[in-house]
Image: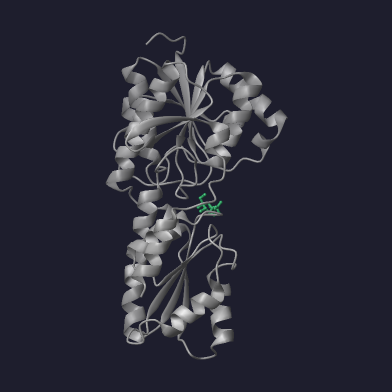
Amino acid sequence: MQSTIKRIGVLTSGGDAPGMNAAIRAVVRAARYYQLNVTGIQRGYDGLIKGEFVEMNSQSVSNIIQRGGTILKTARSNEFRTVEGRKQAFAQLKQQSIDALIVIGGDGTFAGARLIGTEFSIPIVGIAGTIDNDLWGTDFAIGYDTAINTVINAVDKLRDTAESHDRVFIVEVMGRDSGLIALRSGIGAGAEAILIPESQTDIDALLLRLETSRKDKASKIIMVAEGDEMGGALQVARILEERFPKRYDIRVSILGHIQRGGAPSCLDRVLASRLGVAAVEALLAGRQAEMVGIVKGEFSYIPFEQAIKHIGEVNPNLLKLVEILSL
Ligand code: F6P
């Protein structure tokens, strides 16, 4: 591959996701394979502005494929949202002789990359890494598979206690304004109902379903995406209690940041390894301002502005599945 790129920088930004380390490892090893130098940038765009750099080689990424979090650390940078912040960031890149960047993260990360990339014409390729999986142009983002497995493991445990006490558990999961975590993990955990922002929640239909379905089974799991328009698990519990005072023994469980931690699943490790290598190869092939993802097993290269387009829709067949299976 003919390219003028000699040194690449790599950073993780936004919320951490399991598998980010596997992606960093793949980027560094691929870069070394193609005889490029690699600078690790710590704490995302904040660290870039402040000049928090670390030289990386094959050894610096040993024994991290199995670790959650990100060895480069991460941050959500307000300074990088300003032109002045991005100017400083570019000056740092120049000073370090970094010719191109690989950024690992979600929509906020790519929005920032799009801005600095066009303002200062530096080649940047993005790797989809967010448990929310809310990026356009990849079937899976790194971290999503691990997160939904973390959720089903937690819900399996909740079901034991729900079943023993005949309780209704309302479980809130992450996803910001996306319901993809709730939908897939809800199906995987056999939830009786799943509330997500992509489909209008009909609270009366939900209540009717609770009242009429499976009289022999008092315990139920209702999965609520944090971004659902009902306003979260506590709100749903309140409405249920108001409408049917003392009818149900209700408990709320908000899973929170546990969903972002832990060792990445095999799927996430393989995905991260493939995307890391593909990102380096994309830069060497002259690609820029694109996120690399995988659709139906094949690499896809999506301009940042399309990748961050909010999806806002889910496969209706999956919603139907929930209805059929919760009878
Ligand atoms: O984007 C990942 C995510 O975990 C969302 O699901 C959640 O809404 C948000 O980050 C939480 O962000 P923070 O860790 O900054 O509170």
Q: In front: 273, or 307?
A: 307
> In what quadrant of the picture does the N terminus appear?
top left
Q: Quadrant of residue 140?
A: top left
Q: In front: 205, or 47?
A: 205
Instruction: Tell me which residue sits at (37%, 42%) in the image.
Output: 19
- Residue 59 in the image: x percent, y percent? 31, 28
Q: In front: 252, or 6?
A: 252
Q: Quadrant of residue 78?
A: top right
- Residue 130 in the image: x percent, y percent? 46, 45
Q: Is residue 33 above or below residue 153?
A: above
- Residue 133 in the image: x percent, y percent? 45, 47
> In what quadrant of the picture does the C terminus appear?
bottom left
- Residue 71 in the image: x percent, y percent? 42, 39
Q: Quadrant of residue 52?
A: top right
Instruction: Tell me which residue sits at (68%, 31%) in the image.
Output: 85
Instruction: Tell me which residue sits at (35%, 14%) in the image.
Output: 35
Q: Would you say residue 186 is visible in this rendering?
A: no
Q: Is residue 27 above or below residue 1?
A: below
The color scheme shown is one colour
Question: Image check: 290 left or right of 78?
Answer: left
Question: Image check: 44 left or right of 272?
Answer: right
What is the total number of numbered labels drawn onto the structure image? 0
Q: Would you say residue 122 is visible in this rendering?
A: yes
Question: Image check: 92 left or right of 263?
Answer: right
